[in-house]
Image: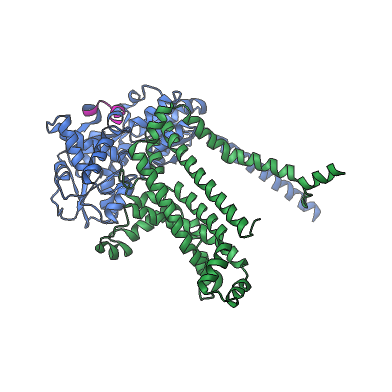
Chain colours: A blue, B green
Amino acid sequence: MHNESKPVWWRTAFLIALGLTLAGSGMLAQAATTLLNVSYDVTRELYKEINPAFIKSWETKTGEKLAINQSHGGSSKQATSVAGGLEADVVTMNQSTDIDLLVGQGGLVAADWEKRFPFGAAPYTSTSVFLVRKGNPKAIRDWGDLARPGVAVIVPNPKTSGNGRYTYLAAWGYAVHKGGNEGQARDFVKRLFANVPVLDGGGRGATTTFTQRGIGDVLVTFENEAALIDKEVGGDKFDIVYPSASILAEAPVAVVDKVVARKGTRKQAQAYLEFLYSAEGQDIIARHHFRPRNEAVLKKYARDFPSLKLFTVESVFGSLAKAQKVHFDDNAIYDQIVIANYRERK
Amino acid sequence: MSVASATSVASPRRVLPGFNLTLGYTLVYLSLLVLIPLAAVFIKTASLSLDQFWAVISSPRVVASYKLSFGASLLAAAINVVFGLLLAWSLVRYRFPGKGLVDSLVDLPFALPTAVAGIALTAIYSANGWVGRIIEPHGIKIAFTPLGVLVALIFIGLPFVVRTVQPILQDLEKELEEASASLGASRWQTFRFVVFPALLPALLTGFALAFARAVGEYGSVIFIAGNMPMVSEITPLMIITKLEQYDYVGATAIAVVMLLASFVLLFAINMLQGWTARRSGRDR
């Protein structure tokens, strides 16, 4: 009994030690190649599909096993977290201003980040479209209809939401593209926002207000969100309406230089973001209703992406940073418009 | 001899030892968790000049939000004092089936994530919700109006009043009321002159807690408020919008105003509470 138990004991100890060593080395290997992608709110489902695809492609190419973690939240809040020390290898946002912030914060991101990947470092785009009640009872066809008296428009708060800011900029850009001067654009946007009864904090909140609370005749939101509502809530309740023109909302990505330099993950982070531009990555992107940059993929999914005139933020406003300053900062044009609307209602 | 007696009067012997240890611990703990973060708010704000600070905190939109935040919080706390007392009274004085259930329901607003509370309340009080459907045709709008803010603040503040009043009510001797009645007092007089003074300190504590919670509340209010400028924007939303613009200093400036106003109000309530406690002989 005694003689037998001793070797068993030793074997067990050996196995445990071996197990610990393996686990330890496994953990070390994993720690060396774990990427953290800090992203905005509605990309959760997208990256759930991108990550395994990239991990597989990276392993077949290099033999290295990667793990990718995700963090999601409001775009600006996420950028603030990274600036505050959240160890993101890459950031994938929906506004260039959120990445500009990281350039300003001790150069976490290189100043020329927009030139480091194709298409201004934005692998996909979206645009602001309309969701109306089934049958379009208020006959809403274009931006002009949103400013009509008696139409209730649901828009997320431009002060707290990128989605809301793009809606505002799209409406302004539409007025400019119709040949309006600044005063006319301002008047148009003012009349549109006079029709807004509720300002939800973010895109999802606006969706809930429109679909669940039954408030408003039209919801202005990103194309991917509209497609998702159509799929999730049911196509028999709502119709998607494409205006004649809208804004090109570019979703920028960047490698966080300071972090990858310290962690030694630059190669992997770079490849991860490049993967978003690959045919496979672009296909996944298109399936999540974001407009791919790849022409072939765009053609394949043409049915999901009706063509409309898309204007960039740069062409109308110079840059998103400038638009933020002129339109959305405290007491800038948006604030002046909503205060004026409030005074007129009184 | 006289010296010894003087010191013994100044510091009576405590039954439990460790005064220095506990006081030291209290100070360190409070500093780390409360004072240092709050000091950081003040230091960050100090980078503004007085004129800039004033411009931030006195802009019309921010002022409108103070009125809503502090007004609705005070009103909600006052309503909670009345109905919280009623609730606590029924829970302590009466026996009815399902009492245990009701008792634990009171704590639910403590436990519920505030976003869930906000979405649930909005769902019920909006035009197509259970309650909204009934009252909206009568011209009363709750969801997406300042009234909705009030409803949310009442909801989150309720347990504070119930839970502070309940133990005092339990300790209140029935004999006092019986004595009062046998001395010829009417039911109202018994409540007014016997029960109410004994409960007042606890009610004030409950009021202060419910108010403090309501002023800082963001999660639940944001869903039901509608967030229209000048009408239904709460002060915490003004702070969040500043943060969205990466205007940290502006955000802390508003936070300083909230902190100071809350501190003054809470301090006043606490003084009042101490005064009523001494008057009713419940000083502890």
Could you say where residue A3 lies in the image, as x and y percent from the top left? 80, 52
Q: Quadrant of residue A102?
A: top left
The correct choice, above or below, for B170 with respect to A116 in the image is below
Residue A294 part of the magenta-drawn span = no
Task: Please state if A186 lies on the left or on the right of B216 as rendered.
Answer: left
Residue furthest to the front: B184
Residue furthest to the right: B1
Could you say where residue B238 lies in the image, as x and y percent from the top left? 38, 40
Q: Main secondary structure of the magenta part?
A: helix
Residue B51 in view in this figure: yes
| Image quadrant occupied by the N terminus of chain A | bottom right
Could you say where residue B188 lies in the image, as x and y percent from the top left? 50, 71
The correct choice, above or below, for A55 with respect to B213 in the image is above
Task: Please state if A326 lies on the left or on the right of B252 as rendered.
Answer: left
Front residue of A179/B131: it is B131
Residue range (magenta): A316-324
Q: Residue at x 30, y 54 (%)?
A: A232
Could you say where residue B204 lies in the image, as x and y percent from the top left? 53, 56
Residue A60 in view in this figure: no
